[in-house]
Amino acid sequence: MPGGPDTEREQLEIALLLEGVYRQYGFDFRQYARASLRRRLWRRTYAEGLRTISGLLERVLHDPSAMERLLLDLSINVTSMFRDPSFFASFRANVVPALRTYPFLRIWNAGCSTGEETYSLAIMLREVGLYERSRIYATDINEAVLHSAAEGIFPLAKMQEYTENYLAAGGSRSFSDYYTAAYERAQLDRSLTENIVFAAHNLVSDRSFNEFHVIVCRNVMIYFDRDLQDRVHRLFLESLSPFGVLGLGRKESVWQSDFAEQYDVVDQAERIYRRHG
Ligand SMILES: C[S@@+](CC[C@H](N)C(=O)[O-])C[C@H]1O[C@@H](n2cnc3c(N)ncnc32)[C@H](O)[C@@H]1O
């Protein structure tokens, strides 16, 4: 039972469910951090009107739409524009000057969710005059969020908060220049998507697909166990060009990985690192 101790039987059921999901659908959650995984599995179990994790396994094996619902639960998609504004302010101050020396920039925004982070990067790059020479590859495991990201439509009610974040991140214009309000929705300036490619990519099972000058992957690896974090760190290291920059989330760090000595610190508080040359 959720809240109670996890019994051996429950651990077995969770292991079987994760194995079944992996074998049937190819989504590999076997090395996601257990406590949050367990909470979410129980939430989906109850939401489906079921009583056991084994029941949930049967449901997802026989009903792909139940798998879609489970995927939404497991791939926690919370995000916002200019989340942790000081990250973007530091990026502007400490990373952008070096980026100016490149004629063309390849940027990977891994675990982009519904796109708020990607558009924040696009806006920042545009304001420092680098957007035109950038290509942002924005990827996520979840196709539903990618679809929504590509539309670039966000709740109008969020714009006040995003305006504050944008200004705290060092934004130099009026944030309302970047969207058109219609009814309850804000449509972001379509020209921001010109140099963005949204695509499905699973950090657990897919390989590197290019070499990047910048990788931003924030608030994704906190959901992985230590071993899986190391695998993803290896993937990032292999995908970064010499002196490439890695930006992580507030609770993430290269120090927690086997690869710390491969990086210099650009800003430890903001979790920004630069790969050795
Ligand atoms: C909490 S959101 C973070 C969004 C954004 N990076 C931010 O910091 O606001 C985590 C995202 O990671 C994605 N994700 C989880 N596991 C993944 C995997 N194995 N490969 C790629 N993306 C994954 C989820 O679908 C979700 O959209």
Image (cartoon, helix red, strand yellow):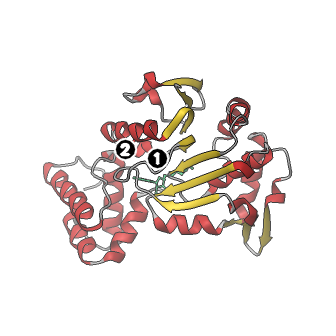
Q: Nearer the viewer, residue 216 or 73?
A: 216
| Percent position of residue 32, x then y | 33, 48
At a point 34% along the width and 73% down the height, the residue shown is 66
Reply above or below: 252 against 179: above
Residue 79 visible, this angle: no
Q: Nearer the viewer, residue 237 or 253?
A: 237
Kind of element beneath mark 1? loop
Q: Disc 1 and disc 2: Cα gap in Å?
A: 8 Å
Identify the residue position indicated by label 1 in the image: 220
Identify the residue position indicated by label 2 in the image: 224
Circle 2: is it few (<14), some (14-19), or many (20+) Cα within 10 Å?
many
| Percent position of residue 90, x then y | 69, 32
Q: Which mark is residue 78?
A: none
Reply above or below: 80 against 247: below
| Percent position of residue 231, x then y | 35, 40
At a point 56% along the width and 23% down the height, the residue shown is 265
| Percent position of residue 170, x then y | 78, 39
Q: Is residue 117 left or right of residue 129?
A: left
